[in-house]
Image: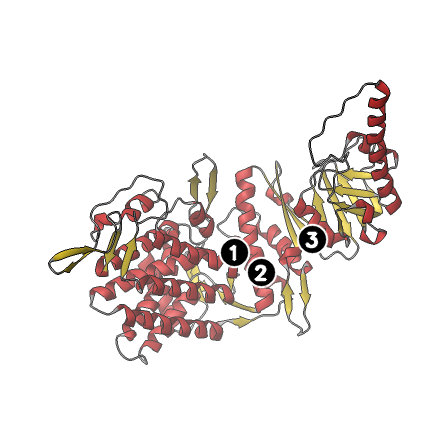
């Protein structure tokens, strides 16, 4: 409760349930929450990073080392912590990978900012210094980045392998990286300006359990994981006219509940005959259209199944809406929602084949733009983590094809940026210079954590990396498998420049957003989840950080 004295009497301006944390306490609160999030994912960074097991309230288990998945699955109800989670989500949306790097750098920036605050440097000066350093870092990334030929298949495979290393896809990364490069190329088009545009919407991912990861495959066209609705139907059709139907092939029901009194058995037979006629009419409409294959999103009546089988038409019911949307592009069809108004122009054209072992239909269209990546794994947990790793790899390869710039990985770019930012700091006047130097120190967190997660001495590794870069070796990074500092670009550890630029920008903006807050006013407990037990001491003190105690306590 906040009070103000007026004519000797206290004036209440906030409710008794409200909490307020001000000045130094507010800064400590925010920085502690943000750092707690960053430290929660640090151990997952790099090829030798560890996995997290996340168990939700329903008992579902997720095993992953994907930064954004970890943060989204964790039960966090702290407002500041959720701001840092947005960094990971933004990184995932914009770059597809590098979420752990972005969050870890944001946490390290705030840690170093806390040291500057202890030296009585005003947050405004720190924020300005971080902004200057971020802009300079982006410029330096562009200067360091190497332009690549997007037709260089070996380089694109290296980008994919770097992204997958340390994740569930690592064992078969050579096979999977080839599939990823082929998939991205299949959905890449050239726009009017001659630039490569990768449309991943035309790439569908299907997952199957019970097979090894090495049996994953790339198919030109789509997959429908359904069975024919009738045993007497054909299971394949070449050069087929394909109907995509969003309408049930069933007896039409009335809009309102009705009751009918039947006094004569003939009347009942007439009702049954009329229902049969309705179904026969629907099947006749399909036959008149010239359809050889029907993929129906809704149900198909048993009698209609019989009629379709008699006509030699392959039909599938309860197909997923997403499958129909994808097949629409593969076979060049329109999704029909009313058979009576449908025309032959609504039909698509392609080949439908059946894989009896996997119980799948493969649908291929002539010159189809869409492709399907069929991922296989032994268990659901393996397939889920494989799919997360593949999605990240697809995004970074797509970024590389679109952007055309790459960097050496293994911490090489971070050490080089730190060195250049320290040189740049000499040209910055005022206390902002200290913030720029703190920014440079924060970037070196990446090689330090890579070394720690690989069981190496982080200080010795950083000293060796700095020495190599001082000698002019811009691509010197840490190879965590040989434990040596080497040219990581030539070793095939390659990252897209855009992802690194986005990570630096997102981390600095999040840190600045947190540093700018000097007063936290909450209508109740300082958490975003009001359903739990309220804990915390008096407002303003460390014990008063209810959201920190309740929300973050469970995640540490």
Of mark 3 and mark 2, the one earlier in the sequence is: 3
Task: Describe the element under mark 3 as helix, strand or loop.
Answer: strand
Q: Which residue is mark 3?
A: 371
Indicate the quadrant where residue 519 lies: bottom left
* Above or below: residue 332 compared with residue 256: below
Task: Describe the element under mark 1 as helix, strand or loop.
Answer: helix
* Above or below: residue 90 compared with residue 119: above
Residue 381 visible in image: yes
Which quarter of the image is occupied by the C terminus?
Answer: top left
Q: CA distance from mark 3 to mark 2?
A: 16 Å
Q: Which residue is mark 2?
A: 397
Near mark 3 (Cα within 10 A), the count class, few <14, some 14-19 or many ≥20, is: many
Near mark 2 (Cα within 10 A), the count class, few <14, some 14-19 or many ≥20, is: many
Q: Marks 2 and 1: in contact by CB < 8 Å?
A: yes
Residue 551 spot, x, y in % from top left? 33, 45
Image-based side of 440 in relation to 62, left or right? left
Q: Marks 3 and 1: in contact by CB < 8 Å?
A: no
């Amino acid at each position: 409760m906040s009070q103000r004295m007026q004519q000797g009497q206290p004036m209440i301006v906030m409710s008794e349930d409200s909490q307020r944390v001000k000045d130094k306490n507010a800064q400590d609160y925010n920085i502690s929450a943000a750092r707690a999030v960053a430290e929660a994912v640090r151990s997952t960074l790099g090829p030798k990073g560890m996995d997290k097991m996340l168990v939700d309230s329903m008992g579902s288990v997720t095993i992953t080392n994907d930064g954004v998945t970890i943060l989204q699955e964790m039960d966090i109800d702290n407002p500041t912590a959720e701001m840092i989670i947005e960094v990971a989500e933004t990184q995932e949306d914009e770059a597809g990978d590098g979420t752990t790097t972005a969050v870890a750098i944001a946490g390290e920036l705030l840690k170093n900012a806390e040291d500057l605050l202890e030296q009585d440097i005003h947050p405004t000066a720190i924020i300005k210094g971080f902004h200057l350093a971020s802009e300079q870092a982006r410029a330096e990334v562009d200067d360091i980045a190497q332009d690549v030929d997007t037709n260089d298949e070996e380089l694109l495979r290296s980008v994919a392998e770097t992204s997958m290393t340390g994740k569930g896809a690592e064992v078969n990364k050579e096979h999977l990286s080839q599939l990823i490069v082929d998939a991205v190329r299949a959905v890449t088009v050239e726009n009017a300006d001659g630039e490569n545009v990768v449309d991943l919407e035309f790439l569908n991912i299907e997952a199957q359990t019970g097979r090894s990861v090495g049996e994953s495959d790339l198919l030109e066209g789509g997959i429908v994981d359904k069975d024919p609705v009738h045993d007497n139907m054909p299971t394949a059709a070449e050069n087929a006219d394909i109907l995509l139907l969003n309408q049930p092939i069933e007896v039409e029901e009335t809009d309102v509940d009705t009751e009918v009194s039947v006094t004569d058995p003939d009347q009942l037979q007439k009702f049954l005959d009329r229902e049969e006629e309705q179904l026969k009419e629907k099947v006749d409409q399909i036959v008149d259209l010239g359809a050889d294959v029907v993929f129906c999103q809704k149900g198909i009546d048993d009698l209609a199944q019989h009629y379709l089988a008699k006509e030699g038409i392959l039909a599938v019911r309860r197909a997923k809406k997403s499958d129909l949307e994808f097949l629409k592009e593969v076979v060049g069809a329109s999704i029909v929602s009313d058979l009576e108004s449908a025309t032959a122009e609504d039909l698509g054209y392609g080949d439908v084949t059946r894989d009896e072992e996997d119980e799948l239909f493969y649908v291929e269209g002539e010159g189809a733009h869409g492709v399907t990546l069929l991922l296989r794994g032994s268990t659901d947990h393996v397939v889920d983590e494989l799919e997360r790793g593949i999605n990240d790899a697809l995004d970074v390869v797509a970024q590389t094809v679109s952007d055309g710039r790459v960097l050496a990985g293994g911490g090489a770019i971070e050490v080089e940026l730190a060195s250049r930012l320290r040189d740049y700091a000499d040209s910055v006047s005022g206390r902002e210079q200290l913030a720029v130097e703190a920014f440079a120190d924060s970037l070196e967190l990446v090689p330090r954590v890579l070394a720690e997660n690989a069981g190496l001495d982080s200080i010795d590794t950083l000293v060796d990396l700095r020495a190599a870069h001082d000698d002019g070796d811009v691509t010197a990074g840490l190879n965590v498998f040989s434990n040596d500092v080497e040219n990581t670009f030539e070793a095939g550890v390659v990252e897209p420049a855009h992802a690194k630029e986005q990570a630096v920008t997102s981390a600095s903006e999040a840190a600045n957003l947190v540093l700018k807050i000097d007063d936290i006013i909450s209508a109740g407990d300082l958490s975003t989840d009001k359903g739990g037990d309220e804990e915390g001491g008096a407002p303003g003190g460390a014990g008063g950080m209810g959201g920190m105690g309740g929300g973050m306590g469970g995640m540490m």
